[in-house]
Image (cartoon, rainbow, N blue to C red):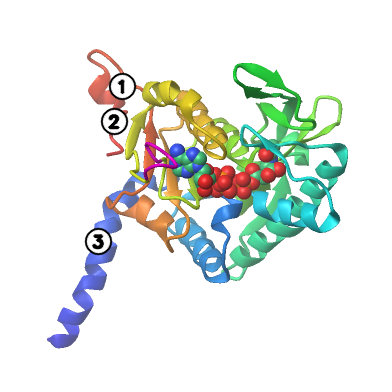
Amino acid sequence: MDDHRGRAPRARTVLEALPWLERYHGRTVVVKFGGNAMVDEELKQAFARDVVALRYAGLRPVVVHGGGPQISALLDRLGLEVKFTAGLRVTTPEVMNVVRMVLAGQVQREIVSLLNTHGAFAVGMTGEDARTLTAVRRPAWVDGQPVDIGLVGDVVRVDPDTVRALLDRGRIPVVSPVARGEHGEVYNVNADLAAAALASALDAEKLVMLTDVAGLYANWPESDEVIARLTAGELEELLPTLASGMVPKMEGCLRAVRDGVRMAHVLDGRIPHILLREVFTDDSTGTVVVPDPVAGPLADIAGTGAAR
Ligand SMILES: Nc1ncnc2c1ncn2[C@@H]1O[C@H](COP(=O)(O)OP(=O)(O)O)[C@@H](O)[C@H]1O
Ligand SMILES: CC(=O)N[C@@H](CCC(=O)OP(=O)(O)O)C(=O)O
């Protein structure tokens, strides 16, 4: 009897996940793993287990990774300047070489290796591969004025065929945020914006951004009160007031939900297994951005507010 009682909570845990397993089976989830969330080995391993668990549960996870702090560390060691404008790295040709080296040669390799300890799943690629991400040079916007920040790209076209083909074969694509220009140039793309563009092109159910804060704070840095839920319209109003790393992150969430992704989350990647909690429980944390409500009789069918 005791044995049965002891095991019941475990069965309950699986049963509680059943509605979410039904809902998300076969759906694509794009997970952005931020450089700031890759703080220790245990967290990285927990992340890899979560992603593989999603795959075993029948979802189609895609990882887009960052690596900002790792790039800055190598630039420092090489004596090159580390400079950001409006959350985007000022990228000279010299810096671009380091960006590409760290993202594709170090961070991506590490994530691929961690995922593959659980099976033959992960395949690494950059946005340059098979012209998956095409970008144009973009400025940063400061006080309404464009500022040149070098080889920073904005994704203008996504060809999701290669990522889809990998997903169809049961693989987990791990994508570095480097893009090709129309004429073969190489661009440094903020990982949040790369993840958002890919999520839209893949018609993903969810975009999940794992970072090093509990979500979008209402009055950062004065307060750490997390905004739990925002519609696209509410976020659009808030966007000009945001600073540093939250600018591309929330811009990415907005673009994704405006472009068909049903939910975009910003979650605290420092909490182990936060990804599984988000997908398979109603124990939601962080900030979720949802599309604007649909007015009129179709509103119920569209169910855009279903996230929370
Ligand atoms: N309103 C805000 N709420 C939370 N964090 C904010 C806010 N504004 C700026 N930040 C900063 O944004 C950082 C997250 O962005 P970033 O450093 O680019 O992380 P990541 O590597 O995960 O993309 C936080 O650590 C925090 O310092
Ligand atoms: C243009 C730009 O800023 N690119 C980023 C790309 C990496 C990134 O976005 O990493 P996180 O997600 O860890 O911040 C950079 O050079 O740092």
Quadrant into which the N terminus falls: bottom left
The amino acid at mark 2 is Gly
Query: Which image quadrant for residue 228?
Result: top left
Determine the quadrant in which ligand 2 lies. Answer: top right
The residue that mark 1 highlights is: 293
The answer to whether 308 appears left or right of 123 in the picture is left
Please state the extent of the stretch shown in magenta in the rendering: 217-223
Q: Nearer the viewer, residue 2 or 148?
A: 148
Q: Nearer the viewer, residue 148 or 262?
A: 148
The amino acid at mark 3 is Leu
The residue that mark 2 highlights is: 305
The amino acid at mark 1 is Pro
64 in the magenta segment = no
In the image, what residue occupies the spot 41% across and 26% down? 235
Decide which of tag 2 and tag 3 comes sooner along the chain: 3
Q: Nearer the viewer, residue 299 or 79?
A: 79
Q: Secondary structure at mark 2?
A: loop
In the image, what residue occupies the spot 70% across and 53% down? 124
- Mark linked to residue 118: none
Q: Kindly check if marks 1 and 2 are in contact, taking CB atoms under 8 A apart as contact.
A: yes
Give percent across and percent down for residue 169.
61, 51
The answer to whether 98 appears left or right of 282 in the picture is right
The residue that mark 3 highlights is: 15
